[in-house]
Amino acid sequence: ANLGRPGYGGFLLIRFAAPVHTPDPLAVDLAQQIDQVLERSGGDWKILIRELDGIEVYSRLSLDRVHVASVIKLAIAALFMKSLENLGKTDLQAVLDMGTGGRSYRQLLRAMLVDSEEDAAAVLQREISANQLNIPRTMEAWGLKGIDLPARRATVQEMVRLAEKLYQGKLVGSEATQILLDQVL
């Protein structure tokens, strides 16, 4: 009578929610080669190589939170474009020709994304605030709430997810996506 009831000699059935990916021999060989190079190089490496369809090719400590330095500027750029969209700006090319502090927004984006200029990042972050974008809510809506903009900390997985979502057009509209991709590709 007690068969199948928890605590009375029953059973526990556990299933994977998605099929488990079995790496092909080339992926295994690549992982071994990367591991060998990293062992010879020393250091503390955090790496994630993932195909756009989500299949991980290689991962090493990709869930560790790290200081992502200038890579965080990609998030700042996407948030800036989102703040413009939330203001109802429809002609982003024209808006980017406007600016502040003697430079156009286009120049500021380039300086931040290409030249890694901290002053440009600070100006664009002030513009995001002035445009009243709720950054935590936006990051959560994007599925990126673990990215800490002020501390510039995130996991490698979160930063890869940010880049993927930008590339796939899931963060901002198509015009804004293309503007940002033109800067970083």
Image (cartoon, helix red, strand yellow):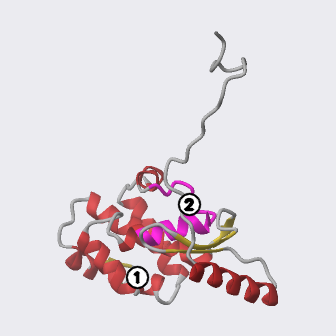
With 99 as the anchor, is 39 left or right in this view? right
Q: Is residue 51 or residue 154 the one in the foreground? A: 51
For the record, the magenta segment spans 143-164
Q: Quadrant of the N terminus?
A: top right
Hey, which residue is sitting farthest left in the picture? 91
Give the residue number, with chain letter if any, for mark 2: 147
- In the picture, residue 11 is in which quadrant? top right
Mark 2 secondary-structure assignment: loop
- In the picture, residue 41 is in which quadrant? bottom right
Whether residue 117 is situated above or below residue 174 in the rendered picture: below
Q: Earlier in the sequence, mark 2 or mark 1?
A: 1
Residue 75: in sight, yes or no? yes
Q: Is residue 83 or residue 19 the one in the foreground? A: 19
Give percent across and percent down for residue 104: 33, 83
In 3D space, how far apart are the residues under numbered discs 2 and 1 (Cα atoms)? 22 Å
Q: Is residue 98 or residue 33 the one in the foreground? A: 33
The crowd level at tag 1 (other Cα within 10 Å; few <14, some 14-19, many 20+) is: many
The crowd level at tag 2 (other Cα within 10 Å; few <14, some 14-19, many 20+) is: many
Q: Amino acid at mark 1?
A: Leu
Whether residue 18 is situated above or below residue 126 in the rendered picture: above
Q: Residue at x 29, y 73 (%)?
A: 176
Give the residue number, with chain letter if any, for mark 1: 108
Q: Residue at x 40, y 63 (%)?
A: 128
Q: Quadrant of the C terminus?
A: bottom left
In reply to whether residue 183 is colored magenta, the answer given is: no
Question: In front of the other: label 2 or label 1?
Answer: 2
Residue 94, disc: none
Give percent across and percent down for residue 180: 35, 78
Q: Amino acid at mark 2?
A: Ile
Count up the numbered dots: 2
